[in-house]
Amino acid sequence: MFDVLWREICEWHPTEVQNRYEMEAVYSLILGCGSYLEIGSSNGGSLWVFGSAVCLGGAIHAIDLGELHSLEYLRDIEQKLKPSRNVTLHIGDSRVVPDMPLEFDVVFIDGGHSYEQVRDDYTNYACMAKKLLIFHDIKSPGPNKVWVETGEGLVIADMSDKRPMGYGVRFI
């Protein structure tokens, strides 16, 4: 299943914005969870792949600024996931917590990448994670600083990939 999802996001976005190895490892951790919250969806690649890992009938919430270049992708992914899962897009700044459930099996933090933005997202949403708390881009200064300050955990990072990516995973 992951291979199909990977091919699809590569077709949508020919310039690879994810690391396949890292994404597949995180996908396997999320697989079968019942609820998922994503903070920062950009072009929707992670929303499509990780949202597809949520069990059928599961709940998916995504918070994103909904910038002009990405909103169409997000709406399209919302529709593709909706027949089999309950999907809600919250368009707006993640510093304002939308009206939604307060518990999710998985919380994925990938919004703004400055230290302050990551810290705010951590403060607002980490407490909602019941099984997994996942940070993206922990090889970047802002996410890395918050990751280290708040306790670290399992690192999934292809060190041969020089791009500032990598995932940090905490099991709750």
Image (spheres, grey):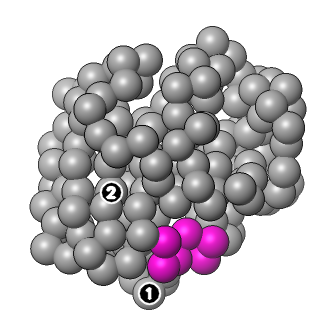
The percent position of residue 153, horizontal first and vertical second, equals 84, 51
- Residue at position x 47%, y 53% in the image: 104
* Quadrant of res 10: bottom left
At 59% from the left edge and 38% from the top edge, which residue is drawn?
Answer: 127
Number of marks in the image?
A: 2
Quarter of the figure with the N terminus? bottom left
Residues 150 and 3: in front is 150
Which region shows up in magenta?
Answer: 27-33
Q: Is residue 142 above or below residue 132?
A: above
The image shows residue 96 at horizontal and vertical percentages of 36, 18
Residue holding disc 1: 1
Furthest toward the top, the residue is 116
Point out the tag, 1 or 2, that comes first from the N-terminus.
1
Q: CA distance from mark 1 to mark 2?
A: 19 Å
Is residue 49 something that shows in the picture?
no
Specify the farthest residue to the front. Answer: 102
